[in-house]
């Protein structure tokens, strides 16, 4: 067992990163969309940074730079989920063990901030600073796209550390639910940013390079009513996606630090539907448009394969929190509503 000396004595705090108090949801959403159009990996890092601000508070200017953060998944019902890091407080120090998903920071650094649950959910959790990167296990790139990978923080043996602070169970549960909701919303924004950038590039290609089908007596591809009709379907789908995720964004932005859990649940329904539709619509738009552009569009010199890889890698690395069955169940039976988005 590794032991980091020191002591800790404090009662659980309720003031760490007030709920939604230090993040402009609409501005963060727009930043992710615009950054995702040209640099999806950077947009992903911005998502991690935004959620970290919600969970840990603004960064301390005097603190050293971080390689990233780690926090558990959202609670299901009244209990915390199995898995993730767990902590036991004894003698002013924590004993940490387990493994937890790791989010990479926008800028490289040394050390990581962890949000860890107490082994007893009623006791809440703790914020811990972990020096160095030896416990961080980077995963392989998905579809060879930078930034999209499964990174984990793994403690192969128990580690004793001094926590930076404690968080009471009630506020911790609320923070994890709200933080997960914002995280899911911003992932929908990244999906949309990739789709919007792809659509702009595809529009240029389809109007200047795509040729009419062989055997058709047409001067250009855009004279083909079948192509125009199909392309119109994809444009309409993109507009529907924009409206849906904007509605979800506004629902989250309306939440206040005093928002009851029921209001968070309702916003979560909107976010879950928007994220799922973003994936469905994105696949339809990208795959279907590539068919219309013709075989030549698959050449790497045009870069359309990059959009497909980025969009697909994002969906694999960060799949929707709530599967379709749970979205449907929430609509037909309110008693089955999930806390997590």
Image (cartoon, rainbow, N blue to C red):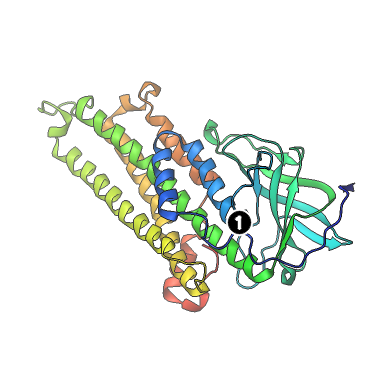
Q: Estimate the x, y position of residue 13 in percent, counting from the top left.
A: 69, 65
Quadrant housing residue 117: bottom right
Q: Residue at x 89, y 61 (%)?
A: 91
Query: SS for tag 1?
Result: helix
Q: Estimate the x, y position of residue 280 in percent, counting from the top left.
A: 39, 51
Q: Residue furthest front?
A: 62
- Asked if residue 83 lies left or right of residue 225, the reply is right
- Asked if residue 123 lies left or right of residue 54, the reply is right
Q: Is residue 291 visible?
A: no
Looking at the picture, does residue 126 appear above or below residue 188? below
Q: Estimate the x, y position of residue 285 in percent, counting from the top left.
A: 33, 43
Q: Of 131 and 237, which appears nearest the observer?
A: 131
> Which residue carries the number 1 mark?
55
Looking at the picture, does residue 6 appear above or below residue 131? below
Give the class, few, some or many, for how many residues have Cα within 10 Å of label 1's Cα (few <14, many ≥20): many
Number of numbered discs present?
A: 1
Q: Residue furthest top?
A: 301
- Asked if residue 74 lies left or right of residue 190, the reply is right
Q: Estimate the x, y position of residue 197 in percent, counting from the top left.
A: 35, 37
- Asked if residue 24 lies left or right of residue 198, the reply is right
Q: Residue at x 44, y 70 (%)?
A: 266
């Amino acid at each position: 067992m590794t032991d980091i000396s020191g002591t800790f004595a404090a009662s659980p705090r309720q003031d760490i990163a007030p709920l939604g108090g230090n993040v402009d949801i609409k501005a963060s959403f727009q930043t992710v969309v615009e950054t995702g159009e040209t640099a999806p990996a950077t947009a992903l890092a911005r998502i991690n940074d935004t959620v970290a601000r919600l969970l840990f508070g603004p960064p301390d200017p005097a603190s050293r730079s971080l390689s990233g953060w780690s926090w558990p998944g959202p609670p299901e019902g009244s209990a915390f989920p199995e898995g993730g890091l767990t902590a036991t407080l004894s003698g002013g120090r924590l004993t940490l063990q387990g493994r937890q998903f790791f989010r990479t920071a926008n800028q490289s650094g040394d050390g990581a901030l962890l949000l860890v649950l107490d082994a007893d959910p009623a006791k809440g959790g703790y914020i811990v600073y972990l020096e160095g990167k030896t416990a961080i296990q980077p995963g392989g790139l998905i579809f060879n796209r930078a930034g999209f990978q499964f990174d984990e923080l793994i403690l192969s043996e128990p580690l004793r550390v001094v926590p930076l602070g404690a968080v009471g169970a009630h506020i911790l549960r609320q923070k994890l639910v709200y933080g997960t909701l914002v995280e899911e919303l911003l992932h929908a924004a990244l999906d949309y940013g990739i789709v919007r950038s792809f659509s702009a590039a595809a529009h240029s290609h389809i109007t200047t390079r795509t040729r009419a089908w062989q055997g058709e007596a047409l001067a250009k591809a855009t004279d083909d009513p079948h192509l125009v009709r199909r392309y119109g379907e994809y444009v309409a789908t993109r507009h529907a996606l924009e409206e849906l995720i904007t509605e979800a964004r506004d629902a989250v932005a309306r939440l206040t630090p005093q928002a009851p859990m029921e209001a968070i649940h309702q916003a979560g329904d909107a976010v879950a539907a928007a994220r799922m539709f973003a994936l469905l619509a994105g696949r339809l738009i990208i795959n279907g448009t590539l068919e219309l552009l013709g075989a030549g569009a698959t050449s790497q010199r045009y870069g359309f394969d990059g959009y497909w890889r980025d969009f697909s890698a994002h969906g694999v690395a960060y799949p929707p929190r709530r599967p379709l069955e749970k979205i449907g169940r929430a609509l037909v039976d309110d008693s089955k509503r999930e806390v997590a988005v």
